[in-house]
Image (cartoon, rainbow, N blue to C red):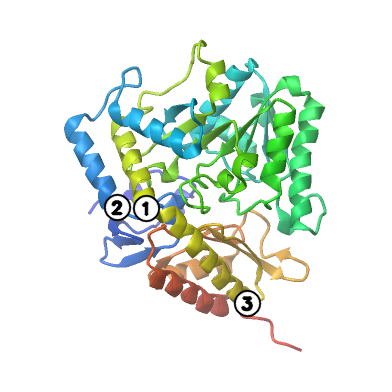
Amino acid sequence: MADERATVLHSWTVQADWNAPTVVGGQGARLQLADGRSLLDMSSLAECSNLGHQHPALVAAIHEQAQRLCFVSNAWGAQPRAALAERLLARSGFEGGRVFFTLGGADANEHAIKIARLAAGKPKGAVIARDRSYHGATHLAMALSGDARTQAQVDAAAFGVHHVPPPYAYRCPFGSVDAAQCGMRAAAAVADRIDALGATDVAAVLMEPDAGTNGIVAPDTYWPALREATAQRGVWLIADEVMSAFGRCGEWFAWQRHGEAGRPDMMTLAKGLTGAAVPLGAVVLSRDVAERIEHEMLYTGLTYCGHPLACAAGVAALDAYAHEGLIERSRTLGARLLAQVQGLQARHPVIGDVRGGHGLFVVIELVADRATRTPLAPWPQTPPALRALVDAAMAAGVSFATRGNLILLAPPLVIEEDDLADAVALLDRLLAHHFPPEPRR
């Protein structure tokens, strides 16, 4: 079997350090490795395989579409593209809106900014995003991201991007010790920045409504207050739902937890849109945004935008979420997972905070001292003991995702309940081994 180490560049890694196993198959929440092992996937790979691996409905849809029509460019119509757009508009309640299909999350966010500026009549209008966010790894997406890893590679100001502090309640940048108040202050910071720049010069605000690999889960006060602040100032609000949609946070789209009070003007999608079976992203526009660009030239798009194979997978994915009750299942199992991890927190002093749990997404933040909330390592460095924990888990047949001092639990929505419980039990044992409590003096 070919070895990638000498031939392939792998993303987000030092090439000389890359030594990952080869995956040859999968079923449900498990991956099959070339060496014969089965691995429980507790991260949905990159938080995108919401439907698990090799979901039969996705495989069948791709096969059937490939026999009928593999490709036609976006300049032509395609039945699966139309069907998927209709489903997305119906599920989101964006009747009268439109959908622009992309290749993934990063270009969905780039296209959303282009569309927002066009609809606002502000071709160089400012965009407000937040610190410690992630919106992709192309240059504009890196400018939008408040990501310490990539800030040196891009000049956000040159792209018209301005950042505000995040709604990070555990370490509130506004000095609040109350989560609800921290959420309100974070929303107020956006309002203040719009006012400082001048609303007439701001085209859009782009934010993650819930889950992200940055590990920040905003307080429930945040998103409705943000929606109110942007609406009052006539600025488009774009919800980056690339990771948080399709059941990950217990709803079709995370903003729906707030009802109409949380409805954005646009949202960006990818990852779970096809259950990661085929690359696909989307920008969903409200009726208001869509009507404003109806007679404008849309100078954007890539060759494979709205690829028929990908859209066919998207239709099958949305049907699977609905027919298998996976949105509701994620909500139920997410609450159970949160309670189980809070139980770990009571036993392990290294766990400083546990958050999430609206769906199958729970964040564990590790600390050197729970009383002072001192991190184990400066963000975004990963402490050596956590790396050792992940290696030990892999040897035991479970793959955990980490970032910095965080453990991100985001398994496929189809995970078996026994497997979920076993993974938490393994984590319990590994935390005790790799982060033993200090002996009492």
Residue pictured at 65% horizontal, 18% vertical = 124
What is the CA distance from the residue labelled 1 to the residue labelled 2?
A: 6 Å
- The quadrant of the picture occupied by the N terminus is bottom left
Q: Are marks 1 and 2 in contact (CB under 8 Å)?
A: yes
Residue 154 x, y percent position in the rendering: 62, 32
Identity, as a three-letter code, of the amino acid under mark 1: Leu
Question: Is 3 placed left or right of 280 in the picture?
Answer: left
Q: Nearer the viewer, residue 164 or 332?
A: 332
Q: Are marks 1 and 3 in contact (CB under 8 Å)?
A: no
Tag 1's secondary structure? loop
Indicate which disc residue 55 carries.
2
The amino acid type, in three-letter code, at marker 3 is: His
**Residue closest to the far left:** 67
**Mark 1: few/some/many CA within 10 Å (<14, 14-19, 20+):** many
Task: Locate the C terminus by quadrant.
Answer: bottom right
Measured along the vertical axis of the image, is residue 241 above or below residue 336? above
Residue identified by numbered label 1? 51
Residue type (three-letter) at the residue carrying disc 2: His
The secondary structure type at the circle numbered 2 is loop
Image mark for residue 348: 3
Q: Residue at x 78, y 40 (%)?
A: 188
Point out residue 409 in the picture as x, y percentages from the top left corner: 51, 61
Residue at the location (64% across, 77% down)? 346
